[in-house]
């Protein structure tokens, strides 16, 4: 599955054109297959270490740990679902109805408590997952400052427990991405 692309990336590394080889953007089964079928240095995964989805912790991190692959997390606010205003991406958000419903309930609970859901989402993703770093994207300096503060301020454990109880069932936590066959629970060579 990865023979040609990985061979080219390895050749680039051997020529000194890059120092590390990584992969991003695929569902967990493909990320895990890539880590077991190649010698990746790093994987970047998005929206798999959020209040809504713990796929990084449950499925990706154990394989990465066993293979010595560094993990980077991104999309702590689930492409905007875990913000007071909701997602503003131009295309249809890929989240399933179960994920959207859970996000809506989480946003409502935080609003009732006077807490910024995006801050809590960043706290969780920055402080909890088993990865080297978390990418926080923003176009506003106040959001960047908030993300830095989220790294340092302790999580409200009671609120966190209430939010995590709202997650969809395990089989419904990750939205499909890419080709349907790549979202299957196992991907073979």
Image (cartoon, rainbow, N blue to C red):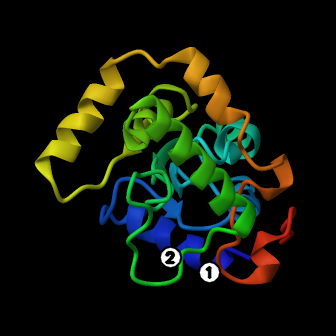
Quarter where residue 104 is shown: bottom right
Residue at 71% x, 83% y is 179
The answer to whether residue 11 is seen in the rendering is yes
Residue projecting furthest to the front = 112
Along the line of sight, the residue nearer the viewer: 150 or 44: 150
Q: Which mark is residue 23?
A: none
> Does dot 2 land on a helix, a strand or a loop?
helix
> Does dot 1 land on a helix, a strand or a loop?
helix
User: Mark 2 and mark 1: span between their CA atoms?
Assistant: 6 Å
Residue on which disc 2 sits: 8
Q: Position of residue 125 (x, y in %)?
A: 49, 37
Along the line of sight, the residue nearer the viewer: 52 or 116: 116
Q: Position of residue 167 (x, y in %)?
A: 72, 44
Q: Position of residue 90 (x, y in %)?
A: 39, 82
Residue at 60% x, 74% y is 94
Instruction: Determine contact: label 2, label 1, CB under 8 Å.
Output: yes
Position of 108 with respect to 53 (left or right) is: left
Quarter where residue 139 is shown: bottom left
How crowded pointer 2 is (Cα within 10 Å; few <14, some 14-19, many 20+) is rated as few
Residue projecting furthest to the left = 141
Which part of the image, by quadrant, shows the N terminus? bottom right
Q: Position of residue 157 (x, y in %)?
A: 57, 16
Residue on which disc 1 sits: 4
């Amino acid at each position: 599955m990865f023979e040609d692309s990985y061979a080219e990336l390895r050749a680039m590394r051997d020529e000194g054109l890059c120092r590390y080889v990584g992969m991003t953007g695929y569902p967990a089964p493909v990320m895990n297959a890539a880590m077991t079928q190649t010698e990746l240095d790093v994987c970047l995964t998005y929206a798999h270490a959020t209040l809504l989805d713990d796929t990084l912790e449950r499925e990706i991190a154990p394989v990465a740990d066993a293979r010595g692959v560094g993990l980077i997390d991104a999309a702590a606010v689930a492409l905007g679902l875990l913000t007071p205003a909701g997602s503003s991406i131009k295309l249809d958000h890929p989240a399933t109805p179960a994920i959207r419903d859970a996000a809506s309930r989480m946003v409502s609970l935080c609003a009732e408590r006077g807490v910024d859901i995006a801050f809590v989402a960043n706290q969780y993703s920055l402080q909890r997952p088993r990865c080297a770093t978390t990418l926080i994207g923003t176009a506003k300096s106040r959001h960047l400052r908030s993300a830095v503060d989220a790294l340092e301020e302790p999580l409200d454990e009671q609120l966190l427990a209430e939010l995590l109880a709202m997650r969809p069932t395990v089989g419904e936590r990750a939205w499909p991405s890419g080709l349907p066959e790549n979202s299957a629970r196992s991907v073979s060579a």
